[in-house]
């Protein structure tokens, strides 16, 4: 099957009205056109399951391999209780798509809630203040200690968080304090102190073989790799993702939830989505934001959206992508 998109311009954003008069106008087309270099052949993503390559702006169904329109994508996402949109943390194009989808889902569900990997649970009270419009940006950065925790440049996330504040969307912290996974990686769950143990999720599944194989590949890229330390590494990853799944389950209301997290946490459903499903039974969809030059499996997500590579190596922070 040949399924190729050669245009450099993807679907653009739409205006999103609201009680605060917020106007969302996303210049995705202009940004993508510059970054992908429309003067020459467009860069693309390769999917071994399909013939051809897929240029910037392509949206593909992971189930059928067919191109879908933005309208069809949003219509399907709007039927789910939980929508996961991934990211490469350093890619501004990914955050533009996230805020675009948030605005479009908000048009379907005015009571939409948002969960973000970027904050740990200790900051929930601050997020509540932000959603209520009680904080300005400087105070928000100070109270969340953004550059001590997430550390990626705040401008990458500014439009997302501004939309949440202007629309008064409930915002939920999904993560656990960063020092907990770091301590598990070097000593395992069994050696956590009584101070750290209460942060552990009630359920921790260490038995998913495909998830384990993927993380073994990631682990082996490190110079410190050995079999004994892999078990600690894997425990840390599972605690991390189980905590985010537990946070989603605790925060889920009758309204749909949009979850923003690194691509690695949503791929193949085995990171956060299946762990949240085990707790909630809530239908979900995943959107994987692929970067040109990638070669990925069609089944990596329910939808694949091809984006330019706009990342900066200087934009370093806490999360894995």
Image (spheres, rainbow, N blue to C red):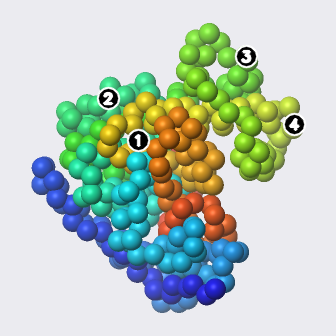
Q: Earlier in the sequence, mark 3 or mark 2?
A: 2
Q: Earlier in the sequence, mark 3 or mark 4?
A: 3
Residue drawn at point x = 25 percent, y = 31 percent: 129
Q: Residue furthest right?
A: 227
Residue drawn at point x = 67 percent, y = 66 percent: 297
How far is mark 4 from mark 1, CA to CA?
Answer: 34 Å
Q: On screen, 304 above or below 29?
A: above
Residue 46 image-quadrant placement: bottom right
Give residue 83's position: percent from left, percent from top. Answer: 44, 52
Kindly check if marks 1 and 2 are in contact, taking CB atoms under 8 A apart as contact: no
- Where disc 3 sits, the SS reads helix
**Tag nearer the camera, 4 or 1:** 1
- Where disc 2 sits, the SS reads helix
**Residue with the mark numbered 2:** 126
Task: Please tell me the numbered disc located at residue 227.
Answer: 4
Residue 138 lies left or right of residue 235; in this view the side is left
How far is mark 3 from mark 2, CA to CA?
Answer: 31 Å
Residue 140 lies left or right of residue 309; in this view the side is left
Quarter of the picture containing the N terminus is bottom right
Q: On screen, 9 above or below 316?
A: below
- Where disc 4 sits, the SS reads helix
């Amino acid at each position: 099957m040949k399924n190729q998109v050669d245009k450099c311009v993807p679907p653009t954003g739409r205006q999103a009205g609201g009680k605060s008069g917020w106007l969302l106008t996303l210049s995705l087309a202009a940004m993508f056109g510059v970054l992908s270099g429309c003067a020459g052949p467009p860069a693309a993503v390769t999917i071994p399951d399909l013939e051809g390559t897929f240029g910037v702006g392509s949206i593909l169904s992971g189930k059928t391999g067919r191109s879908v329109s933005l309208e069809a994508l949003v219509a399907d996402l709007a039927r789910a209780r939980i929508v996961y949109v991934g990211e490469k943390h350093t890619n501004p194009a990914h955050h533009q798509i996230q805020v675009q989808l948030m605005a479009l889902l908000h048009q379907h569900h005015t009571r939409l809630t948002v969960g973000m990997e970027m904050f740990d649970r200790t900051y929930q009270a601050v997020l509540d203040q932000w959603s209520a419009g009680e904080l300005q940006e400087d105070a928000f950065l100070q109270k969340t200690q953004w550059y001590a925790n997430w550390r990626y440049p705040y401008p990458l996330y500014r439009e997302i968080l501004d939309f949440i504040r202007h629309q008064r969307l409930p915002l939920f912290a999904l993560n656990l304090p960063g020092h907990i996974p770091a301590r598990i990686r070097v000593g395992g769950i069994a050696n956590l102190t009584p101070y750290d143990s209460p942060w552990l999720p009630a359920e921790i599944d260490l038995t998913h073989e495909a998830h384990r194989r993927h993380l073994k590949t990631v682990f082996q890229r490190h110079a410190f790799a050995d079999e004994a330390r892999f078990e600690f590494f894997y425990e840390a990853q599972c605690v991390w993702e189980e905590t985010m799944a537990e946070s989603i389950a605790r925060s889920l209301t009758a309204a749909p939830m949009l979850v923003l997290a690194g691509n690695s946490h949503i791929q193949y459903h085995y990171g956060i989505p299946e762990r949240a499903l085990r707790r909630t039974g809530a239908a979900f969809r995943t959107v994987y934001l692929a970067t040109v030059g990638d070669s990925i499996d069609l089944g990596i997500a329910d939808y694949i959206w091809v984006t330019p590579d706009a990342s900066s190596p200087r934009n370093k922070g806490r999360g894995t992508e």
